[in-house]
Image (spheres, rainbow, N blue to C red):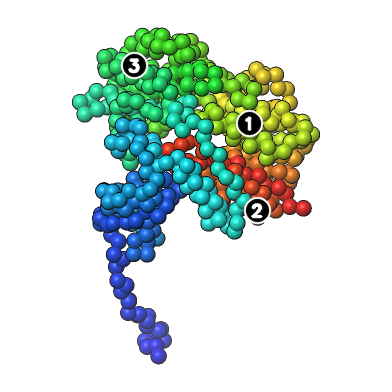
Amino acid sequence: MRCVIDGLPLPTYRRRVSTPPHPLRKHAEIELDIERLALGGQGLAHHAGMVVFVDGALPGDRVRAHVTRRRERFAEAFTVERLAAGPGRVEPPCAHFAAGDCGGCRLQDLDYPLQLAAKEEQVRETLAHVGGFADPPVLPIAGSPDVFRYRNKMEFSFHPGADGEPLLGLHRRRRYDQVFPLTACWLCSPLVNQVVELTQRFAREHGWAAYHPARHTGLVRFLVVRHLPLTEQAMVNLVAARDEVPAVADWARAVAGLDPRVRGVVQNLNASRANIAIGEPGRERRLAGSPTVAERLHGLTFEISANAFLQTNSRQAEALYAATLEEAALTGHERVLDLYCGAGTITLLLARRAREVVGCEAVEDAVLAARVNAERNGIANARFVLGEARALLREWSEPWTPEVVVVDPPRAGLHARVVARVAGMRPERIVYVSCNPATLARDLQGFAAEGYALERVRPFDLFPHTPHVEAVARLTLRR
């Protein structure tokens, strides 16, 4: 019975029942048995009914871990001590990795076949849990032909040292605000390591002021080196905050004279606060040689500028592109739409087997490079349109609709409206090239809701010793 005063009921108070606190607390140190790898490369364990993601732990390890973060359904931790090693551990060749310095590689101490098995299973589980596919049609993963020395592009960061001296290297593990001076990286070619060593020495001798990303002080920001394995051409790009780098012309001559494979040296300016290793549009200066290099994929030559996108594992990229062409299943009569086409690599490969291909890209430099690549390779049935995919699809003015659509979006995947507008065109096939299993699963679920059936997903490992995995998925219109 409720009490009433002046005709208004009094509020009812319920006694709050306290629940016992969960035993897992932030900064606690606990012992864990690692069951498998999670999608981001951490070891996955359970403690007191809660999932714990553990950095620096591999399947089969027993570790003592320090909890750094606690949420309602999971916790994060890092390995303090390895009490027992799992069966898949191997000796890493990189001294930086062995010392725990480098954040580039996460899995260098895990046997490569086990890396592949873990990535394949992660794609399958993500499609099931995120995409809702009960029995996802995932094919066996394709491993990289090169396990080391496979990267054709590396980005190195400058950072002021304790005494203000310029450091040049890679970011420390779990610390994006710190850089360690690089001795040698096993993911890039020896030539790239030589360029880094020369630049480290030159920067110290000439007092280059390293940029501080938090304080926004200093001058030199990044050193970006491409060495393309299929043509053996290399390009070096120095990214600076201002055009005041001491003796930069002498540095460029020294780099260009290091090896005849170095075809060009450029300087890009980036005065923004965004900590990304690219230059601002129109602010590139050629210092030596050519401002572009070329890579050859599937018989086509692609011109690459300093800021252009190219898959960083050239040999495995050929396998990825071959799978894309197979899933497109072109007969020569189809019109194809290629969204997020970059510099036109996939677009031009499609054009050799299609009636007509339109490539869409939001980056102006990439569109210009794509048009140059089409002319260089004598391909006349490919056109390139500058614009953001959602706007271009909303204002689609072509007199035809595509029979096949290929999408190769960034890690964030497709906007929901892009999914709806692509599906609204009712192409017979959609080929999705993905670099993120989570957004791939989400977008495939969106296409399934629009009337498309997922036929198969083919995972590819383009980045050994890292948690990243690519995939090619094929969807067909349900009849």
The residue carrying mark 2 is 448
Answer with mark 2 or mark 1, whichever residue precedes in sequence: 1
Q: Which residue is mark 3?
A: 198
> Real-space Cα distance between discs 3 and 1?
36 Å
Q: Nearer the viewer, residue 41 or 113?
A: 113
In front here: 388 or 324?
324
Number of numbered discs on residues? 3
Q: Count residues near mark 3 (Cα–Cα under 10 Å), then give few for <14, some for 14-19, many for 20+.
A: some
The reply to whether callout 3 and callout 1 are in contact (CB within 8 Å) is: no
Query: From the viewer's perspective, is 62 left or right of 312?
Result: left
Q: Is residue 277 visible?
A: no
Q: Pointer 1: what residue?
A: 346
Picture residue at 52% right of the left edge, 38% below the top: 143
Judge whether 335 appears above or below 78 on screen: above
Crowding around mark 2 (Cα neighbors within 10 Å: few <14, some 14 to 19, many 20+) is some
Apparent side of residue 273 relative to residue 282 in the rendered image (left or right): left
Residue drawn at x 26%, y 14% is 205
Callout 3 secondary element: helix
Q: Earlier in the sequence, mark 3 or mark 2?
A: 3
Does residue 414 sit above or below 198 in this rendering? below
Task: Locate the N terminus and report the quarter of the image it occupies.
Answer: bottom left
| Nearer to us in this view, 221 or 398 | 221
Which amino acid type is shown beneath numbered disc 3?
Leu
Q: Are marks 3 and 2 in contact (CB under 8 Å)?
A: no
